[in-house]
Image (spheres, grey):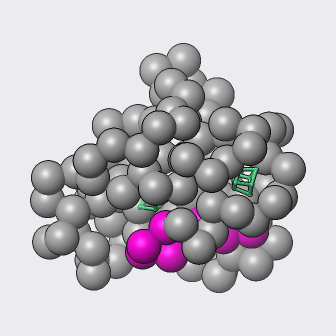
Amino acid sequence: PFVVTDSCIFCKYTTCVEVCPMNCFREGPHFLVIAPDECIDCSMCVPECPVGAIYNATDLPSHLAHFTQLNADLAASATWKPINRSQAALPDHESWRATRDKLTILKS
Ligand code: SF4
Ligand code: F3S
């Protein structure tokens, strides 16, 4: 499956969700994830993300490897809901755009 990674956190542009033929995306307060059991590996979402947050799990850089399990876990959470219409990015998306390892900040 494809995986949403760190660049999405605190930005959440949501342009990715409009092109997904399987409605795989799930929304939380600060980023999105992909439900791995629904993704058909079409790759349509990848070029839609302005910050390059989406990877094929098989091509994930090693420093982002933990996002595969995180996508699966959060997609299974009852509080993360399906999203298939784009919406406004989070208010501070410009200032967060270049920040790396935002998951650490989110969890702190
Ligand atoms: Fe949806 Fe295709 Fe992206 Fe998987 S790869 S999340 S099926 S758009
Ligand atoms: Fe996130 Fe990129 Fe989609 S920032 S919400 S993966 S368009």
Q: Which stretch did the figure color magenta?
A: 49-56
Horizontal and vertical percent position of residue 62: 65, 80
**Residue for point 27% across, 81% down:** 98
Work out whether 107 lies above or below 84: below
The front one of 63 and 18 is: 18
Q: Can residue 65 be seen in this snapshot? A: no
The front one of 18 and 82 is: 18
Would residue 52 be counted in the magenta stretch?
A: yes
Left or right: where does residue 16 sit relative to residue 107? Answer: right
Left or right: where does residue 100 sit relative to residue 74? Answer: left
Q: Where is ligand 2, by quadrant?
A: bottom left
**Residue for point 42% across, 73% down:** 50
Work out whether 95 lies above or below 24: below
Would residue 5 be counted in the magenta stretch?
A: no
Q: Can residue 100 be seen in this snapshot? A: yes
Horizontal and vertical percent position of residue 94: 18, 70
**Residue for point 27% across, 53% down:** 89
Left or right: where does residue 74 sit relative to residue 40? Answer: left
Give the prevailing secondary structure in the magenta stretch.
loop
The front one of 2 and 22 is: 22
**Residue for point 42% across, 74% down:** 51
Work out whether 31 lies above or below 45: above
For residue 73, what is the image quadrant? top right
Work out whether 60 lies above or below 82: below
Horizontal and vertical percent position of residue 29: 32, 37
Q: Quadrant of the N terminus?
A: bottom right
Horizontal and vertical percent position of residue 31: 40, 48
Q: Residue furthest right?
A: 40
Question: Total number of numbered labels?
Answer: 0
